[in-house]
Image (spheres, rainbow, N blue to C red):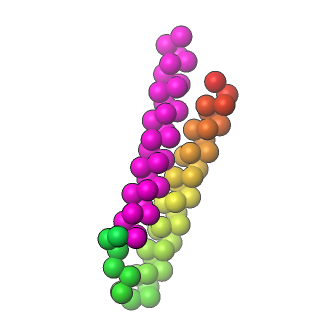
């Protein structure tokens, strides 16, 4: 029983981390990042944006997959 409860806790922590990563990344690039910099800096930050959004979606996918197996 403790094992199942700990799996639920891990799943919901992963979902929270995914949510926070996704919205904090998008919020930073929408409200904080200065897009009037050089093209190289914009390219680097756009690649970082894509990597972080994909990472948050991957965390969400694995959490949902784990949740469905419980």
Which quadrant holds residue 36? bottom left
**Residue 16 located left or right of residue 59:** left
**Viewer-closest of 2 and 32:** 32
> Is 5 above or below relative to 37?
above
Q: Is residue 29 magenta?
A: yes
**Viewer-closest of 33 and 6:** 33
Q: Quadrant of the C terminus?
A: top right
Residue found 47% across the figure and 48% down from its top: 19
> Is 54 above or below relative to 13?
below
Q: Is residue 2 magenta?
A: yes
**Residue 25 located left or right of residue 60:** left
Residue found 49% across the figure and 60% down from its top: 52
> Is 52 above or below relative to 34?
above
- Image coordinates for residue 33, horizontal then vertical, percent: 35, 74
- Image coordinates for residue 9, horizontal then vertical, percent: 47, 27
- Image coordinates for residue 26, horizontal then vertical, percent: 44, 63
- Image coordinates for residue 64, horizontal then vertical, percent: 61, 38
Span shown in magenta:
1-30
Q: Main secondary structure of the magenta part?
A: helix
Residue found 38% across the figure and 82% down from its top: 35
């Amino acid at each position: 029983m403790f094992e199942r409860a700990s799996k639920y806790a891990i799943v919901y922590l992963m979902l929270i981390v995914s949510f926070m990563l996704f919205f904090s990344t998008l919020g930073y690039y929408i409200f904080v990042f200065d897009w009037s910099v050089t093209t190289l800096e914009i390219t680097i930050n756009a690649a970082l944006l894509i990597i972080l959004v994909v990472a948050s979606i991957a965390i969400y996918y694995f959490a949902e997959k784990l949740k469905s197996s419980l």
